[in-house]
Amino acid sequence: MTVELLAAAVIDACEAEGIKHMLTGAFAFNLYGIPRATKDVDVVLSVESSGPMERVIARLDPVVEFNGQVQFDTLTWGRRLVGVARQKSPIKVELFELFDDPFVMSQFERRRQLFSKQINRTTWLPTAEDVIVQKLRWGRSKDLNDARDVLAVQGTETLDMAYVEGWCAKHGTATRLADALAGIPPL
Amino acid sequence: MPNIHDDPAALKALQDDIYREKILRARKQTMEERLADGIDLTNNAFLRMLEGAMWQLGTADEAVGTMEVRRRMERLGRVSDEGRFANQRPSLP
């Protein structure tokens, strides 16, 4: 199964259950940065209880095998469920539950709608500023590279840097932001 | 021909040139084009992984190659998730 068909299946499952959602991870990054391959389809779901999530997983069962183990992000303790595409390419599907972290909520509220011809679906994605803030917060080397790439491609002159700096100050990631900006060569 | 690795400044300049080119290329694209490129890169990467696995294992059987790709992806996932995800929340004090 191609990654766009898998993304479409996840979007369809969320829409069928009436669940607000947002594609995140590399799909979001690729909108704003230097395109790269990914190994997963990451989606944030706004759910009040476990029932809706279980129904989404049930709808995806023909194409995605979920391992049933709820995991927690050690940075924010948000919940994640992971599945793998059943056919051919073992692309992962990661479903993140929206939870009451101030930035996570803000990012979701600010999400924007986009129609993708390749996915052949209208979907929701975060803003460039929120991708930068989130990547700096996670702070793995690939996340820091992604944040730098979005800053470089979008340009600080087009971004709401006050917004980015505000969240970085709250998260204690101002130094990471400075380092990312310093890593962009003169253009 | 001098070895660029012996000249850190020249190496950094080359790296910056390569990165600059990537940034400027991405800047010329629309959001939709960048998303589409990411999708194509992903699908092609998995095809390359399958071809590579089959070649390394000396098999023409795609199912065998796919199993090996799954095994490798599962290892990569463990590396990527190390320290980042836990199976339970810590107890509150």
Image (cartoon, coloured by chain):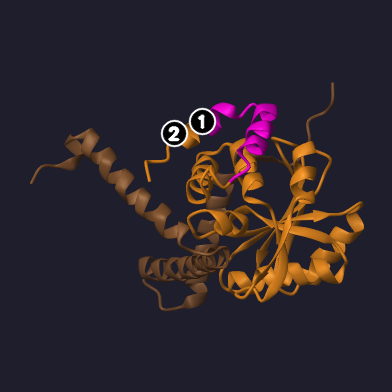
Quadrant the C terminus of chain B occupies: top right
Q: Residues within 10 Å of mark 2 (few under 14, many from 20)?
A: few
* Dominant secondary structure, magenta: helix
Residue depicted at x 54% and y 57%: B73
Q: Amino acid at mark 2?
A: Ala
The chain letter corresponding to orange is A
Span of residues in magenta = A159-178
Residue depicted at x 54% and y 27%: A175
Please identify which colour was used for chain B in the image.
brown
User: Element under label 1?
Assistant: helix
Work out whether residue A86 can be spotted.
no
Q: Do discs 1 and 2 belong to a common subunit?
A: yes
From the viewer's perspective, tell me whether residue A131 is left or right of residue B72.
right
What is the residue that sits farthest to the left in this orientation? B1
Q: Are marks 1 and 2 in contact (CB under 8 Å)?
A: yes
Q: Is residue A100 above or below residue B70?
A: above
Q: Residues within 10 Å of mark 1 (few under 14, many from 20)?
A: few
Residue at image mark 2: A182
Res A178 label: 1
Magenta highlight on residue A162: yes
Residue depicted at x 23% and y 34%: B9
